[in-house]
Structure formats: C-alpha cells, structure tokens
Image: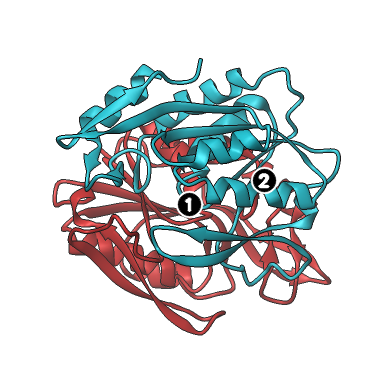
Chain colours: A red, B cyan
Amino acid sequence: MKLLEDRIKEDGIVLDCEVLKVDRFLTHQIDAHLMHEIGQTFAQSFADLGITKVVTIEASGIAPALYAAEVLGVPMVFARKTKSLTMNEELLTSEVYSFTKQVTSTISISKRFLNHTDKVLIIDDFLANGQAAKGLVELCQQAGSDVVGIGIVIEKSFQTGRALLEAAGIPIKSLARIKGFVDGQVEFLSADA
Amino acid sequence: MKLLEDRIKEDGIVLDCEVLKVDRFLTHQIDAHLMHEIGQTFAQSFADLGITKVVTIEASGIAPALYAAEVLGVPMVFARKTKSLTMNEELLTSEVYSFTKQVTSTISISKRFLNHTDKVLIIDDFLANGQAAKGLVELCQQAGSDVVGIGIVIEKSFQTGRALLEAAGIPIKSLARIKGFVDGQVEFLSADA
C-alpha cells in the first residue's frame, strides 16, 4: 500500500536495527483518514469470505480493525491485555510471550463474543515474531471460530511471524512489508497483492 | 442521543447500583456504525472552535475519539496507561485515581504531540468520578494546550465527575446521561443539547 509506505518513510523513526517507531500516525497519535484507507483495503482484500467478526488486540490494533469492521458491516472485538473489572464471565484466554519485553502476558476475550459460527478476520498493527497474532488465533480456536484471514498493517518480514502464521494455513495480507533497515532508512519488500 | 440511549436499554447490563456493563457495543465488542454516529455528533457539537487535536485514553475511548477526529479532520492522540517500550522521549504524565480499583495509575502522552498552539477536544467513553478526564485535562495543561471541550459517551450523572469538570470551566457534552438504576433498568436525564 503505497500511501502507507510513503507515510512510514516520511514519519517513521528507526530506533535500532529491529525497532520502527510509528507513533506519529499509528501507535500513539493516530491519523484517522489513513486508518480509514487501511480498514477499507483490508475489507476489500477479505471480501466474499463471509466474515462475521473482526478481532484485534488493544490498543494500537483498534483503529485499523474498527474501520475494517465498519466497511465489512460486522462487529469488532478487541482482546484485552489485562482483565477488566466488569469481565465477570467466562473468558477465552491465551498466553502471549513478548520477545522485546521478555514477559508472558495473558490476553482474553469474553466467551460471549466468539462462537463456532463465527468467521473471523484478525487485524493487528505489527507482525514481528507473530506471538500476538498466534495468541489471537488461539482465542478464536478455543471458541470454535474459523480464522479466515489475518490483516497486518506493518510486517517486519525479517522476523519469523509470517512463517509461523503461514504454517497454520491462514491467509495473510500485510500492507507494508519491511525487508530491513539500512542506514536508518526503511527498505520494503513488495506488499501482498 | 436517542440511538445511544436505545442501545444502552437494549444491550446494557446493570451489574449493581453503580456499574453498567456495555461491552456488547462499546468497551469490548464495538459497534463501528454506532461509534461513527457518536463521533459525528461530537464533531458537530464542537464545530467552529478551531480544534486541532482530539485526545482520549486507551482503550475504550479510542473508537469514539477516532471518528470525532476523522470528521473534524485533525489527529487523535490516546494517552497510555502503561509506558510503551518505544516511548523513549519526554512525557506529559498525570496520576489518575480509580475509585473502583482503588489504585493510582500514571497516564502519559509524549510531549511531541501536544503543545501551546493546540485546541483540544477530550473524548472518553465514561464519566463517573471524573478522575480520568481530569488526568487528561492535566496532561493538556502541562503542554500549555487549551482544552475547549469534553465529549462523553455515557455519563453517570449521579456521580461527581461532571461537577468536577464544570468547576474547571470546560464545556461538556454527554450523549447519554444516567440518572440512576431502578430494578436493574437504566433511567436517563435529558442529554446535553
């Protein structure tokens, strides 16, 4: 997605060889117009699959997932990283290991919002080692839901996440695929067609 | 906002005399179409004030704030409840006390995203004791930004938040104002004009 790649080049900051900071438009300050375009692109890519729910994880996945859900005309559900006070019912839970933080956290979705009739599109802001997406896939599987696709805003293609998800047989659409960082500049692979 | 009040009556669950659970459309599963209507209503209510930023707090504030920002044509910034790994710069921070959880947490926004030229619309999902909104106002004040309005999706009018914010002289628009709960049913005040 050229609009996104241009924005990453313009506003992304390469912190070191593995970390790209995009807090000017995606992870802290959010450009709603860009998120709308991103959501629309995801919705078009996964049209005609009978999607019934869009699932993401708080907080930076919410904006692109919301617009995708709006265009698809289905509800969006975001997994929580901490348990809410009013989550007094049964939960789907999964353990997610963070390589950067080196901690395991429990993510959860209420059982009331996913079931065996659901066809789910998972959306997330980043794909690196694939642990967050894998955790979301596991929540859907626990509910008996069918994960029909995964939409990623920015993929770090030099890390192992994509291979992990492809091994599970789930179609992936990444809007920007980063090959690597050279002299503080981002180099892209061709994005998914 | 009748659409919202109807939805609260239909899908809201009164847990006890002070807790309303709206996780079927706002705080966990999100109805994007309803959020779009809500964002549009906020944008119309605070039009012509020269707003340059919409500010909210993760996670449930993001959806209504995003649509308000899109309609107003300005960026949205969400305050974080925990420090992000890539937040390596100077932060605006504020302490927020939660009466329900009885803990104080630190919320933050990067100094790069708010400054003395900004006119800010604060959006949040709930107004109860007003502590979260007060914390967001403090972040804006630290940056020298002018808070020109506060938009609240659901106000618990029987709690003290509104009085706290009105004392600070900031115009408030609440789309649903809850007078109280009677026999597990929600009773509304007239919403803000």
Left or right? Give the position of A123 relative to B16. right
Circle 1 residues within 10 Å: few <14, some 14–19, many ≥20: many
Answer yes or no: is residue B49 visible.
Answer: yes
Which mark is drawn over residue B14? Answer: none
| Left or right relative to B122: residue B32 | left
Q: Is label 2 in contact with label 1 (beta carbons under 8 Å)?
A: no
Chain under disc 1: B
Relative placement, left or right, of B12 versus A5 is: left
Q: Where is residue A117 in the image (x, y as percent from the top left)?
A: 15, 46
Q: Label 2: few (<14), some or many (≥20) within 10 Å?
A: many
Toward which corner of the image does residue B68 lie, by quadrant?
Answer: top right
Instruction: Specify the quadrant of the image occupied by residue A137.
Output: bottom left
Percent position of residue A112, x then y: 19, 50
Residue shown at 47% from the left, 37% from the top = A67
Total count of labels: 2
Q: What residue type is labelled 1?
A: Ala
Q: Which residue is drawn at 61% across and 48% down?
A: B134
Q: Name the residue under label 2.
A: B137
Q: Residue B59 carries which label?
A: 1
- Give the x, y percent position of residue A140: 25, 59
Instruction: Residue A33: tell me if it is visible.
Output: no
The residue closer to the viewer here, B173 or A5, is B173
